[in-house]
Image: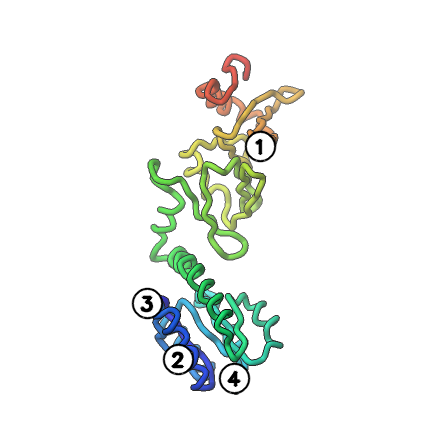
């Protein structure tokens, strides 16, 4: 069930919102608490760890925006839907990364659109809370180190604060960038990940990646051709999406051994790549 807290200083507004939730999400939502001010809301949020908070902005004393800003980021794992009669708050609300913004009186079509967003986001948010919980570190390891016969995917933490699911078969290479790393894909897209490349080195090696430089690992399955550089000290690999990558002199032998082992399968004559 989707645990929901409703915060509004007007009892009539809380009752109206509860009725809408029960009507449209009766089998999915449980309104676990209501609050009429920021103090009650803060206590309810910390106690119940809701999935969604419907939050009035304009309240006597501490308003909804101040309330949200006062909650420590480690507890802000819930989705926020602002509900207010004052649309001048919209820009500030969006800056707080709210899922949605509803204007009183609530339009049913707009509410239905909000319901759809909640359905789409709650599952993702639950995964994030599990992954960020130290007691479930083994779950994160299981996501990032799939069994050989499992669907080969990684859950990658991004700079936007969310995890993105990627299939390893689509990754051409990974390169280090200080304490971050960048995953590059066959279609040309790149994704900056908020972990160092060394955290992924072992799982990448298990799935056909080889280090061609201290700061780069490439997928063997995406290599189309190898050639020596003009001075023959370094090498180059051409990927099947047209990108060229430099192979460091110290990494050439390992790469060439790997290419010789599967050279015919990727269209390289094993006798001509050395």
Callout 4–callout 3 Cβ contact below 8 Å:
no
Residue 24 falls left or right of residue 80: left
Earlier sequence position, callout 4 versus callout 1:
4
What residue is drawn where x is 35% and y is 75%?
32
Helix, strand or loop at mark 3: loop
- Tell me which corner region of the image, top left, top right, bottom left or bottom right, holds residue 274: top right
x and y, in percent, of residue 18 in the image: 39, 77
Q: For marks 3 and 1, give the CA distance.
A: 47 Å
Callout 4–callout 1 Cβ contact below 8 Å:
no
Helix, strand or loop at mark 2: strand
Q: Which residue is mark 1?
A: 241
Decide: is 193 above or below 129.
Answer: above
Decide: is 70 above or below 261.
Answer: below
x and y, in percent, of residue 219 in the image: 49, 32
Q: Which residue is mark 4?
A: 59
Earlier sequence position, callout 2 versus callout 1:
2
Helix, strand or loop at mark 1: loop
The single residue placed furthest to the top in the displayed view is: 271
Residue 35 falls left or right of residue 63: left
x and y, in percent, of residue 144 in the image: 40, 45
Q: For marks 4 and 3, give the CA distance.
A: 30 Å
Few, some or many residues within 10 Å of mark 2 (<14, 14–19, 20+): many
Is 55 or 197 nearer to us in this picture?
55
* Residue 179 visible in this rendered orientation of the protein: no
Q: Which residue is mark 2?
A: 34
Callout 2–callout 1 Cβ contact below 8 Å:
no
Is 262 or 82 nearer to us in this picture?
82
Q: Which residue is mark 3?
A: 27
Please give the label number shown on residue 142. Answer: none
Decide: is 56 above or below 138.
Answer: below
Earlier sequence position, callout 4 versus callout 3:
3
Q: For marks 2 and 3, give the CA distance.
A: 19 Å
């Amino acid at each position: 069930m989707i645990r929901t807290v409703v915060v509004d200083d007007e009892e009539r507004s809380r009752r109206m919102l509860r009725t809408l939730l029960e009507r449209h999400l009766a089998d999915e939502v449980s309104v676990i608490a209501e609050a009429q001010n920021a103090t009650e809301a803060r206590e309810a949020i910390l106690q119940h760890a809701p999935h969604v908070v419907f939050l009035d902005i304009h309240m006597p004393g501490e308003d909804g925006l101040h309330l949200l800003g006062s909650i420590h980021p480690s507890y802000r794992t819930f989705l926020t839907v602002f509900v207010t009669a004052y649309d001048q708050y919209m820009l500030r609300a969006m800056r707080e990364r709210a899922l949605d913004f509803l204007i009183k009186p609530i339009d049913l079509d707009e509410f239905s659109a909000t319901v759809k967003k909640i359905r789409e986001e709650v599952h993702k948010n639950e995964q994030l809370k599990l992954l960020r919980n130290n007691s479930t570190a083994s779950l994160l390891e299981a996501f990032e180190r799939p069994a050989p016969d499992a669907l080969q995917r990684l859950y990658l933490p991004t700079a936007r604060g969310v995890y993105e699911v990627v299939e390893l078969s689509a990754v051409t290479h990974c390169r280090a960038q200080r304490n971050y790393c960048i995953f590059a894909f066959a279609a040309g897209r790149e994704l900056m990940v908020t972990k160092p490349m060394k955290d992924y080195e072992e799982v990448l090696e298990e799935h056909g990646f080889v280090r061609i430089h201290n700061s780069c690992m490439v997928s063997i399955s995406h290599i189309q051709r190898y050639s020596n550089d003009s001075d023959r000290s370094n090498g180059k690999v051409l990927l099947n999406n047209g990108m060229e990558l430099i192979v460091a002199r110290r990494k050439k032998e390992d790469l060439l051994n790997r290419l010789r082992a599967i050279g015919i399968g990727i269209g390289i004559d094993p006798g001509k790549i050395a």
